[in-house]
Image: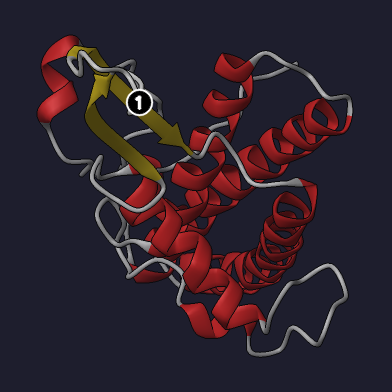
Amino acid sequence: MPELYVAKVDYEEAKKLADFASIYQDLSFTVDVLKRLIQLVEEDNEDSILTQSLWTAALISYVRCFSSGKRFGSGLQENIFEDLEYDPELEDDPITCHRYYKNLRDKHIAHSVNPFEQVEVGLILSEPDNPDREIQGVATLLQKLIHLDVEGLKSLLRLVLFAKEEVRKQAKECETRTLEVGKGLPIDALYSKARVRIITPAPVDAGRARK
């Protein structure tokens, strides 16, 4: 099969299309992770390391679709859910649900001090009726949210599936506009442009923003 000759373009429509492609990839990953996590929870899987890892990955990949850190535009906005009608799989209205999951990521995943991760330290005392009352040791009590229940996971999955479909439709429209603009460019200039290629990043690139 002959190799495609692809001329790199970076006008506004192309940059927006790149954003949509990146967001769609994140949403697709989130869908796959949530489906796997729901399956494990429904099977009463006791591998807390695996389930917690999947839950963390799902929240991070979902919320980053709504951030502007690495993208040309501003990422998705919560008003994308305004057209999502009532769904019994959602535990509240769509935007309220979205904000709940975003807050979980911001407070529960990104920061260690939050109501979903509690640590209390106390002193272990002898029985109150013991004539020789004394301190017998130290107790450290921990409570941490590993993941939500199945209903909570399915609610998030419903939001992600809706957002993914909306992104797909917007990306298709953006692809059409990208092609229209491209057809207006001088053909010889396109052939002289650098060909599109993906470069494997080096370790030093870990601290650099995406161009």
Picture residue at 73% right of the left edge, 32% below the top: 37
Vertical side of 121 occupied by 23: above or below: below
Picture residue at 63% right of the left edge, 37% below the top: 29
Task: Name the one closer to the observer, 175 or 33.
Answer: 33
Residue identifier under label 1: 129
Whether residue 4 sits left or right of residue 135 in the image: it is right
Q: Position of residue 126 (x, y in %)?
A: 30, 17
Seen as rendered, the residue at the extreme front is 131
* Figure label count: 1
Q: Quarter of the image for the C terminus: give it.
A: top left
Whether residue 70 sits left or right of residue 158 in the image: it is left
Task: Name the one closer to the observer, 64 or 157.
Answer: 157
Kindly state the secondary structure of the residue where label 1 is placed.
Answer: loop
Q: Position of residue 94 (x, y in %)?
A: 65, 79
Whether residue 50 sits left or right of residue 143 in the image: it is right
Picture residue at 61% right of the left edge, 49% below the top: 27
